[in-house]
Structures are given as structure tokens and as C-alpha cells.
Image: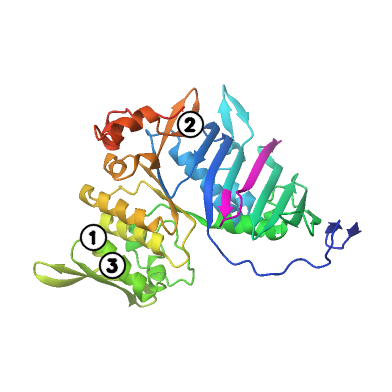
Amino acid sequence: MTSLDDGLVEIDSDETNLDTEFVDREHPRFISLELTNFLSYKQAKLEFGEFIALVGPNASGKSNLVAAIKLLREIPTYGLQTAIARRGGFDQLRHRSAGRPYDPAIRLTFAMGENPASTYELRLGAVKGQRYKVKKESADVYWRGRRFTLDSDGSKVVWTDARQNGANRRRAEFVVAPGQSAISTGGLGGYVVYDALQMMQTVEVNPAKVADLQEPSSTREFDSDGSNVTSIYENLDAATKRELVDELAAIVPGIESIEVARLADRQTLRFRQRTESGIREFYAKQMSDGTLRALAILLAALQRSRPGLLVIEEPEVAIHLGALRTLVELLQVQSEQSQILITTHSADIVDALPIDSIRIVWSQSDASHVAPISEHSKEPVRLGLITPGQLLRSDSLDPAI
């Protein structure tokens, strides 16, 4: 064992240098998200797919599932303390049953390529003054024929790096700042987790932000509210721009082109649309909220830095019913590149999805629950006797419990 000045302790190491090979950015495949005592959930497991839709009444818990994804996404971006603060603080995250608060935990399962499934788990605990501590943070990562583990008690982290057959095992220990995540000091395994969390992205488009004059930005990642659509669009290659225009034209007939227009030090999007009186040009400010929402959602799916998981909350808002099915069909095509999760109240959207893609969220016994649809609800749909949307309208979509 060797103690180093920076707090590193190396143990049982066969190598003297940290592996410096470059970690190529690759899409993880997200498998499941498990919540324990998190917001309205006492115990729940969400199983992902290529395209899934969360359906359920208002206040049933759909947004709280998205909140868990946002928290995980923001840990590598802002740090754990800020990510928790952006969710309203630690005390707000705790599930309460009969008035008693319980400490929350999140477990994410994902896979890198053809490797076995990897896991990341975070457990938080309360300390006086409505503050928190990291009770446990752990990861078990399989990547490129190697297995990495990370285990933190909130004050130190121990990570290991080994071939999957156990050869060339390496172990190291680092100090962790109180209340902070250990993944940034977790070796290559921590880096893989760090990158996987960053590849989850949520979209809550604000048409007013899309319409506003925007400052040019070098950020290559779509802002959740759409406030950098001009820069994201400008960064697309010509073929993807054409694909976006064609997709939008399937929703808004007559759209022929989109270009970035510069006005002093700001920029906006300019649309060319064929109308009965000929070709007309419109700035984003002149387009409908539904058009701007559809544009931003499609752009989020086509952005150059594509996410591994794209979460879209209520895509039906402000979009004409006749265009919803087209939008969903286009998103289903994009789910071949990025997994997509949507929350929705729309029976029209539900009708456009395979029955196995739907997850039901409901509240019972002072807690939220999530599950796939039961087989007895699926059977009449498969026989063509009724549609998923009709079952949703009649409140007859039963969960598999």
C-alpha cells in the first residue's frame, strides 16, 4: 500500500500508471430505473425500451420518474449538490409515508454494446439541518472486455479495474468531498458511468424560447427548453437539415426550407413555406406554437450530439391532433438511433404505439407505481377488438401487477 500526497492510496496494483487509453463516446442501452423512497415512489422499477410512453392521471407520478432521470443527468453536469438543489433540495426528494420521511435511492441499469449489463446506484441519507450525506454510491461496469467497480461510503471511494476473467486486477482508493458524487474519481469505470448519465436528456420545449431572438452558441447539445435551436440547427450537416425539413413538412404542409437568419448580434430561424398565394417567408416569431414545438422536438432527436435516451414530456401540447400520429411515427424512426421516452395524456399518441411500449403510472396507498400493461388488457388489442387509446379513454388500461 502506498500513500500519495493527493490522497490516492494504491492497493494490489500490477501496473504503476493509470490506463490513459481514450474512451470513445458510445451509446449505452438503458435497461431499467429503480427508485426507492424517491418522491412519490416507495419502491418502483421502470423498464425501458426503444420507445416507451408513460401514461396515467395527473399527479400519478409521471413527472417524478422524469425528475429521477433529470437528477442522474445533472450529477456529471452540475455536481451532486447542485443537482439535488435543482430538484428542490434533499428533503423534497424523500418519500413520506404516514408523515415519516425515508431516505431515497436510485439504481440505473444499462449496457455498453454487447457487454453484460452495468449498474450504478446512489443512496442518500439525512443529517441534521435538512442536509444529506452519501450513504452509498456504487457501480459495476462492463466495457470492452473489462470489469470496473466503484464503491463509495461518501468519504472515500475504492475502484477496481480488471479483465472480465479477473486478470491484471488493479485497485485504488481516493478521498471524496462530503455530499459529492465519486464518479469523477472512479477511474475508467467512473468515466463510463459519467458519460452514460450525460447521455440522458430531457426536453420540455417552451415555444416562446424557440421564437425569441437567440444568442449564437457553441454548445452542441440541445437546451431542454429549445433556447438554442438556431445554433443546434446550424450545426447539422446538410443531409440532416434536409431530413428535418422533410419531417417538419410531414406535420406542417408546405414547409420547403429552414435557414438561420442573423439580426444584429442575435439570430432566429426563417421558414420558407408554400401557400396558396405562393412561397412566403416567416420568422420563428410568426410561426404557431405547435409548429415550433414540433420543430424543436424533431431537432432534439436529430441533433449532432444525439442522446442515448431522449425524454419528451407531453409532446401533444399545442400540436394539432391530426399531426400527432405523424410526429409519433417520426419519433419511432428516430428511436432506432436514440431510445425515447415520452409522458402523455393523449389517446391519439397511445393509439400510434405498440401496446408493449406503454407503461402505466398510478397512485395507490400513498405511493406511485409503474408497470407494463397486463396481458388481459393486451389481448383484446391484439385481437383487434379495441385500441389502446380507447382503453385509455375508458380508464381500462390495467397494469401487470
Range of the magenta residues? 110-129
Is 206 placed above or below 349 here?
below
Residue 263 point in image, percent of width and height: 33, 76
Whether 314 is among the magenta residues is no
Residue picked out by circle 1:
250
Which quarter of the figure has residue 335? bottom left
Q: Amino acid at mark 3?
A: Val
The front one of 348 and 8 is 348
N-terminal of the pair, mark 2 or mark 3, is 3
Residue in view at x 52 percent, y 50 percent: 30
N-terminal of the pair, mark 2 or mark 1, is 1
Residue picked out by circle 2:
369
Tell me the crowding category of disc 3: few under 14, some 14 to 19, or many 20 or more residues within 10 angstroms, Cα based. Answer: many
In 3D space, how far apart are the residues under numbered discs 2 and 1 (Cα atoms)?
Answer: 36 Å
The image shows a total of numbered marks equal to: 3
Residue picked out by circle 3:
245
Q: Amino acid at mark 2?
A: His
Is 244 placed above or below 356 here?
below
Q: Mark 3 and mark 2 in contact (Cβ < 8 Å)?
A: no
